[in-house]
Amino acid sequence: MRRVFALLAALLVLVVVAQFFLAASGAFDTAPTDESFQPHRGLGYGIILFAVLLTIVAALARMPGRLIGMTGLVAGLVVVQSLIRRLADALNGTGDTSTTAGQLVFGLHAVNGLIILALAVTVARRARALSRSAVADRTAGAGGGSGASGPAAGPAQPES
């Protein structure tokens, strides 16, 4: 189950990177409009669901509490992304005009996105390390205690 969590955590990192790509694609469209950001917005809602699912998988896999919390924090920060956008829109003028306050608040959207990416990478790295240690523990336990193999036995001596 820990391997499944590690794979899903790595997938989360890739999805967050794709989210940055979609944001840039919308921003650098020849005529950026609200429609240009629809794929970015849709994937954002998908990331919320995926992060919640990943948090549940982390708990079922009996990952350390801190890692479960960090995974849940990803979901929470993605919700904050939506709130930042709505607050910035509320501070903007009517129509397509934006205010300085709206632009400053919306700048936090990108900063929060970077925090989400860093947190997702941290979760994936820790999950991978825990997955590897669990596999190493299983293979060490499966050796049956034959006694004379492994690094503790020392280097092999040539026979004379």
Image (cartoon, rainbow, N blue to C red):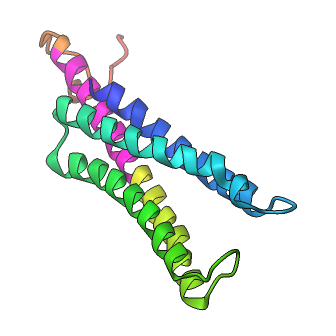
Q: Residue at x 33, y 19 (%)?
A: 157
Q: Which residues are magenta?
A: 122-141
Helix, strand or loop: magenta stretch: helix
Q: Nearer the viewer, residue 35 or 55?
A: 35
Q: Is residue 146 above or below residue 90?
A: above
> Which of 11/98 is in front?
98
For residue 145, side relative to residue 126 (left or right):
left
In the displayed structure image, the side of residue 145 where residue 41 appears, left or right: right
Say which quarter of the image contains residue 3. Answer: top left
Q: Residue 113: x, y in percent?
A: 50, 62
Residue 34 lies, in percent from the top left, at 69, 59
Answer above or below: position of 160 versus 64: above
Query: Does the magenta-highlighted stretch encompass residue 15?
Result: no
Residue, x 38% and y 40% (percent of image)? 49
Image quadrant where one finds the N terminus: top left
Q: Quadrant of residue 28?
A: bottom right
Percent position of residue 58, x then y: 24, 36
Q: Is residue 41 visible?
A: yes
Give me the residue at 33% from left, 31% from top.
5
The correct choice, above or below, for 81 with respect to 62 in the image is below
Q: Quadrant of the C terminus?
A: top left
- Residue 105's x, y, as percent? 50, 80
